[in-house]
Image (cartoon, grey):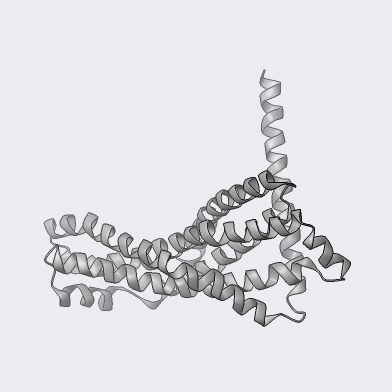
């Protein structure tokens, strides 16, 4: 029994290492393709499809997140006489962590799944093989525009989400908790540094890369058939969210 358990653990570790190596090889291939002619028209199309259409979801997510965060902390801060820091705490919490992480999770659920479904369908219908026959590298044609679009749009979406989240916190603090409008904004001016927000934007760039690479990876590795498309999409979303949380720890340690 212990031997079988160790064999099982070893096999799972080998699967993870193989997966990480396979993704790293794909990422290296994508980076190699980037210095060549980039199809900016495709990049802009992906930015519109993957970025602009995601803005309403991220806006609602961050609005309610800022409101809930303020609801949770305002009463306690007022009780201990620290209401002059509420605006700063909400801004730092959203700017450093909640903004980029929630934007990445939303992007993984909407953007990553769409990428996987689209590319896996192309694989099942042999369109990717047709690109290879026409001497077109699928990584340069399919993955590079999507990765650039995610890396450009997710920081912008995060910045918008940060502002909306802070506005949601301001509305609750002023109109529900009775905090002075001046006190809320003055705490942001006094205690929030530009690095608190810039660090979150930097995180969003990495998260956008993760969503795009894993979404395209699972699309290209999808098994044949409609069932394979569904399984690949599910794996893409789950793995992307886990990777975002893991990289968030590393990036927080480096940036802050």
Where residue 202 appears, as percent x and y from the top left, is 51, 71
- Quadrant housing residue 147: bottom right
Residue 85 visible to the viewer: no
Above/below status of 143 relative to 238 = below
Above/below status of 18 relative to 108 = above
Where residue 214 appears, as percent x and y from the top left, is 64, 57
Left/right of residue 63 with respect to residue 17 in the rendered view: left
Where residue 110 appears, as percent x and y from the top left, is 52, 59
Which quadrant is the N terminus positioned in? top right
Q: Nearer the viewer, residue 11 or 136?
A: 136
Count of residue discs: 0
Above/below status of 89 relative to 4 = below
Residue placed furthest toward the top: 1
Left/right of residue 208 with respect to residue 94 in the rendered view: right
Left/right of residue 49 with respect to residue 133 in the rendered view: left
Q: Nearer the viewer, residue 13 or 147?
A: 147
Residue 112 visible to the viewer: yes
Where residue 236 appears, as percent x and y from the top left, is 61, 52
Q: Nearer the viewer, residue 200 or 155?
A: 155
Above/below status of 251 relative to 195 = above
| Residue at x-position 56% and y-position 49% | 238
| Residue at x-position 23% and y-position 54% | 72
- Quadrant housing residue 125: bottom right
Which quadrant is the C terminus positioned in? bottom left
| Residue at x-position 34% and y-position 67% | 92
């Amino acid at each position: 029994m212990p031997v079988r358990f160790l064999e099982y653990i070893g096999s799972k570790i080998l699967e993870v290492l193989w997966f990480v190596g396979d993704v790293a090889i794909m990422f290296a291939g994508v980076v190699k393709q980037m210095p060549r002619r980039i199809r900016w028209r495709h990049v802009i199309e992906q930015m519109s499809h993957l970025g602009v259409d995601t803005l309403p979801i991220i806006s609602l997510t961050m609005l309610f997140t800022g409101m809930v965060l303020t609801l949770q902390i305002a009463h306690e801060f007022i009780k201990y006489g620290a209401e002059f820091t509420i605006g700063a705490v909400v801004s730092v919490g959203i700017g450093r962590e909640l903004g980029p992480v929630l934007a990445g999770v939303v992007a993984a659920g909407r953007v990553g799944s769409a990428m996987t479904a689209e590319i896996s369908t192309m694989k099942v219908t042999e369109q990717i093989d047709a690109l290879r026959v026409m001497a077109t590298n699928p990584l340069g044609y399919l993955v590079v525009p999507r990765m650039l679009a995610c890396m450009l749009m997710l920081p912008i979406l995060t910045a918008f989400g940060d502002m909306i989240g802070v506005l949601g916190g301001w509305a609750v603090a002023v109109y529900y908790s009775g905090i002075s409008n001046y006190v809320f904004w003055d705490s942001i001016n006094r205690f929030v540094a530009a690095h608190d927000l810039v660090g979150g934007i930097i995180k969003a760039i990495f998260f956008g890369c993760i969503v795009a690479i894993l979404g395209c990876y699972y699309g290209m590795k999808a098994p044949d058939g409609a069932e394979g498309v569904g399984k690949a999409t599910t794996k893409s979303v789950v793995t992307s969210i886990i990777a975002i949380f893991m990289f968030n720890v590393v990036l927080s340690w480096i940036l802050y």
